[in-house]
Image (cartoon, rainbow, N blue to C red):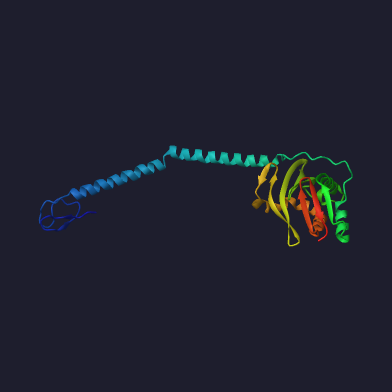
Amino acid sequence: MTKLVCPDCRHENEPERIYCHNCGARLDRSGVKKEKEATEENAATTQERLRKMFAPDRRLNWDIWIKLGKVILGALVAAVVIQMLLPPDLPAEKKNDAFAPMISMDLFTAIENHNPPRLTYSQAQVNSYLASTIRRMNSPAKDGFFPISQLFAQFEEGVFRLNVRHAFFGFPISCGSFYHVSVDQGKISAANSGGYIGRMPIHPAIMRYLDVLFSKTWATLARERKDVARLAGIEFHPQSVTLITVR
């Protein structure tokens, strides 16, 4: 609080005094009045701010925004789930009525005998072989709670796409993964370039953590993967794949 200084004797008086306690001269109280008005104004401003903060209409507005945010978040989650359950928009696969080629046996024989140096299969032949693989009585595709109902391969230039359809209580759920395949220092390597679940595209950085979706697929194709790892090279072209058996 401002102390009142007597203009005559310079004695400091208490703020509530009108006359000097020392000499009796009248004191100038204009400074005290301004300070009091400023204090009252600050108090009124604070009260008004608190009133607005705790006003019922303000709380109601916050409740509306919170509920709206929950609705939007729920709608986004529902949209993602629906997209994941919808079947992907894939080109129709041409059925091959011919007998499925014994690709695994061809691979084993060619690698062991180094002959022939190259094996070329069409996309239809590979898919016919995959269909017969998951139909085998001892196929891991039939095991467990989430059996595989279809394996479907697609070949593009330098790119291999594997599409998998699972059966969940009779309801089909599809997922897929895309790979850029190359040969580095005599070893075949595959870099994930993305994938999907249903119609929901998945970024490559996330797909690496979703490999569990393909665990049954890799178990079903364990023998083929082991043979492919022994190849000298592999080339993917539109609608066909070439396996290079001689280094």
Within the image, what quadrant is residue 50 found in? top left
Please provide percent x and percent y for residue 22. 12, 58
Total numbered labels placed on residues in the image: 0
Please provide percent x and percent y for residue 120. 83, 50
- Picture residue at 20% right of the left edge, 50% below the top: 31
Identify whether 164 is placed above or below 21.
above
Question: Which residue is at the front of the view, 220 or 244?
Answer: 244
- Picture residue at 31% right of the left edge, 43% below the top: 44
Q: Quadrant of the C terminus?
A: bottom right
- Picture residue at 79% right of the left edge, 59% below the top: 232
Relative to residue 147, is residue 25 drawn left or right? left
Residue 216 seen from this side: no
Relative to residue 68, is residue 162 drawn left or right? right
Within the image, what quadrant is residue 111 found in? bottom right
Q: Quadrant of the N terminus?
A: bottom left
Please provide percent x and percent y for residue 208. 68, 53
Please provide percent x and percent y for residue 193. 68, 50
- Picture residue at 48% right of the left edge, 40% below the top: 62
Relative to residue 173, is residue 108 drawn left or right? right
Identify whether 92 is placed above or below 4.
above
Question: Which residue is at the front of the view, 62 or 21?
Answer: 62
Residue 48 seen from this side: yes
Question: Which residue is at the front of the view, 216 or 239?
Answer: 239
Relative to residue 28, is residue 68 drawn left or right? right
